Amino acid sequence: MLSKLFKYEFSATGRVFLPMYAVLLVMSLIARIFYSVEGLQSDILFALITMLLVMLFTAVWVVTFVIIIKRFWDNLLGRQGYLMHVLPVNPWEHVLAKMVTSGVWCVAGAVVSALAFALMLFGIPELAEIDFSEFFGWLREAVDALREHNMYGQSILIIVQTVLHSFVSCFEFVLTAYAAMCIGQLANRHRVWASIGAYFGICIVRSLLTSLFSEHRFFNVNVTFPANMPGEVLRWINESLALSLLLSLIICAALFFVSSTLLKKKLNLQ
Amino acid sequence: MSWTFSGERPIYSQLVEQLQLRIVTGVYPPGSRMETVRELANEAAVNPNTMQRAMSELERRGLVFSQRTAGRFVTDDPESIAALRAELAQEKIDRFLGEMRKLGYEKREVVALLEREERT
Amino acid sequence: MNEILICRGLAKSYGGPRALDAIDLTLERGRIVGLLGPNGSGKTTLIKLANGLLTPTAGEILIDGDAPGAVTKSKVSYLPDADYLPDYMNLRDLMYMFRDFYEDFDADKAKEMFTSLGLGPTDRLKSLSKGNREKTQLVLTMSRRAQLYLLDEPIGGVDPAARDYILRTIIGNYSENGTVLISTHLIADIESVLDEVVFLKNGKIMLHSNADELREREGKSVDALFREVFAC
């Protein structure tokens, strides 16, 4: 059943996301052509197209978040809830399907944005002339230096953790929104305002937890700044990242539990 | 012939009456195959269970019979149909006489009225 | 087990007075049951509880022996009193969706019923009239071979021709051993299809009886009796 839920979730949201990505990519291509064709390069046109693209990039993210939120609200808490909640599926499966789908669209949005940016950027003649071998040489030197001081592993770990962090933050945002809507729908009137209030409530609780966590961490840290041993600093950063990742995961699990339980026990369709 | 029901009496007994009437008047000819209970229920817009009960009653009275695979048929025995016809006629006469009595007519006067009706 | 729906001391309160007040009700298989009561008597609440869209404040409700959940939902076919299908879908999408999620969904039957309504698989819900949207919901609900059909006000606010279509679709398509629970306040319109009637008033059951026995005993129509029971 879960796989079927995924299928419907992707097809329902894909009808908005995919065309949007297509528009973004096409616009970048057009921009690239404008940038590269000589004689077309008037300053006004350049500014205009750049502005349009910046707006488009912003729009992709705004639309992504709006759709993630609206899909949950309409499909599970609005009229369509009468369809979804009588499917032979458990409430947690609904939350999971929506969460994973949203996560995938967040990542897809990032990838497509990067792709569009690259497409456009390499259309600028000045950029195309840059010699990247210099950059790669510098990178190689840096890696060698890190190896020499036994910090290579730690550095890679930082990068991996940072990437993981952005994934988890993505899910955390989505789950915070879901939990907030599940709480907001409990109200019989002004459900949207109640949801927004719940969202800020969760955020406040979350930042309190973070500060509790990090205070505890800072008082117990065994590092002197500026450290003479950069390896120690890296380790310290890694440990901090790991802890904060753990905190995020715990919060995600809690938000997931809150959302599924409210859908199961306190559904209030109108 | 359309199906109409009054809410005051059990739908079941009204169904039995209307089905009998259809057999007597040849809407369902002797020996013919009847529609399924579901189809009949759908046609009459009544509950299939009620139609089933009415059908069982007709079966009990020997007006229809089931063959395990072929379905349900109207009796092809002319005598049962004739008897049913007479029975329905008797019911109508009784009801008619009852109503005439309410109007103050004796049976004899009713017969006289009917004879005069026949002459015109 | 011959009972499909059992309520024991079932109560639901939305914070104020109880919408359902300690109801005991047992429905057997293969019946068409009218859930009759004026607006606000608790009909929709009972149906939502049976669908697991609400959780009881007290007591229990069992469908085929289980509390509402994923298992019971596969046995229950529900027609809500709301326009609930997503606008962008067309009839084929909907049929695929129902077929994917409900093993008892008969897509051929649904297709046939759509065709007889003059609707094609590529028709989008958005393009349908209000009447046809309601019929679409009914067709999807009745194309399942479910054990329990819960129909919330299926004939509310429709014209006599549509009402006739709806009633015929219900009695012509519910599964052999399935039970159909129809909630309505328009009793005269559906009297002739009911096996049993349940009168609900202020969240309490006033009467639960076989419809024909009731007519025999009282010598009046269910509708007339309803008017007496609910006279203000």
Image (tube, rainbow, N blue to C red):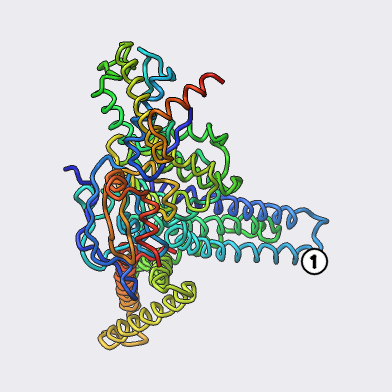
Using the image as rendered, state which of residue A232 and residue A68 is in the foreground: A68
Q: Chain of mark 1?
A: A
Using the image as rendered, state which of residue A19 and residue A227 is in the foreground: A19
Give the residue at x 58% y 58%: A132
Callout 1: 10 Å neighbours few (<14), some, many (20+)?
A: few
C117 left or right of C44?
A: right
Q: Quadrant of residue A181?
A: bottom left
Could you tell me residue C225's position as x and y percent? 35, 55
Could you tell me residue A138's position as x and y percent? 50, 64
Identify the residue under disc 1. A43
Give the residue at x 23% y 55%: C25
Number of numbered tags placed on the structure image = 1
Mark 1: secondary structure: helix
Quadrant location, the N terminus of chain C: top left
Quadrant location, the C terminus of chain C: bottom left
Could you tell me residue B41's position as x and y percent? 38, 32
Give the residue at x 32% y 76%: A240
Identity, as a three-letter code, of the amino acid under mark 1: Asp
Q: Is residue A225 visible?
A: yes
Using the image as rendered, state which of residue A44 and residue A268 is in the foreground: A268
Could you tell me residue A96's position as x and y percent? 35, 57
Task: Give the residue furthest to the left.
Answer: C1
Q: Is residue A269 above or below residue A204?
A: above
